[in-house]
Image: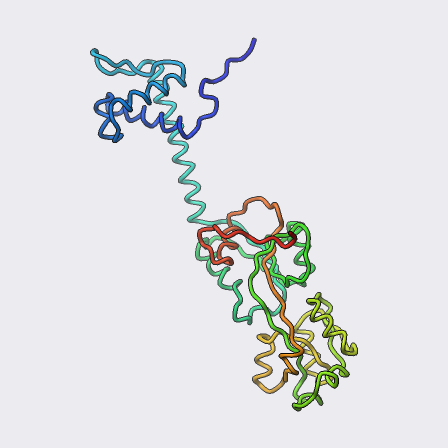
Amino acid sequence: MDQKTSPLGQVSDFELKLLRVFRTVAACGGFSAAEVSLGISRAAISMQMADLENRLGFRLCQRGRAGFALTDEGRRVLEASDRLLGAISHFRAEIDDLHRHLRGTLSIGITDNLVSHPGMKITHGLAALKARGPEVRIHLHMQPSDDIEIGVLDGRLNIGVVPRIRERPGLDCLPLYEERSSLYCAAGHPLAAAGAGPDDIARHELVMPSFALPPEAEALCRRHPLGARANDREGILFLVLTGRYLGYLPEHYARPWVEGGQLAALLPQRLGFTTRFGAITVRGRRPNLVLDTFLDTLAGDPDGTETVRQVDK
């Protein structure tokens, strides 16, 4: 024997609207009395009540010369609609509370020595996130860019800030800013005195980074004999300050040593390069209110209408 299906099936927004009309009519004690509360005519109320009764499959009230009265079914529907609409109101309040009181953890990976960049958005983004959600916990990991990409892909990190050097399938990227790097030597290096040309500079040993560089930078580095290797920019600075090597450093990072007379830039207009940075997240990720809020702050889009750009098209 087939089980009888519910006349309503799934409750849509329109059925919820009809139930609210019914609740108002029942509370007012009739169609005429409900006109003012609902702001519609008695005829419109009558049509909507008839529509709801047809959808439910039974009469909800008696109306006529004898006056207005709920049927037994009408009283039960009224009780059920009170529970349903109350639950919807409670659900909306819970969602509003989530937006007002963000909770959870944001795990973010960042490559080294970005904090001194004048266009750095991460600090401001984290401050804005904590202002929205004081209870949000932030786990910050300083790692090489390759490790950050893997961490985002395998779920250990929610988001990473890395150079946009190559396309990595499975990642979305929000462009953040550009970073200019120049070639430096220590104040005691023979090239510190002005006047050396590109060919002369290219004969001196270079600290080669172990991390990935833009193709333009790779080509510039290959012009020099390899003198040493370093796996981060602080390591490059240490070796350059020995006065024995040249090395590429971000201009914002090298500025304090340049201003202090310890470093000198070598033909920055000809021998420098630009690296683009972006915030990466895993493609097809599940919604995460903490992460989504942080991305909105980075995009400068508090309403969340900015679309995150994809790395691999």
Foreground of the two, 146 or 45: 45
Residue drawn at (65%, 76%) of the image: 272
What is the x, y in percent for residue 304?
Answer: 47, 50
Q: Quadrant of residue 250?
A: bottom right
In the image as oriented, which residue stretches furthest toward the top? 1
Q: Colour scheme used in the picture?
A: rainbow
Residue, x 64% and y 77% (percent of image)?
182
The residue lying at 66 percent from left, 56 percent from top is: 149
The x and y percentages for residue 279 are 58, 58
Q: Horizontal placement of 199 versus 18: left or right?
A: right
Q: Quadrant of residue 117?
A: bottom right
Quarter of the image where one finds residue 70: top left
Q: Looking at the image, how many numbered discs can be counted on the residues?
A: 0
| Residue 155 place in picture, x, y as percent | 64, 49
Residue 308 placement (x, y as % from top left): 55, 53
Judge left or right: residue 155 versus residue 10: right
* Viewer-nearest residue: 144 or 133: 144
Location of the N terminus by quadrant is: top right
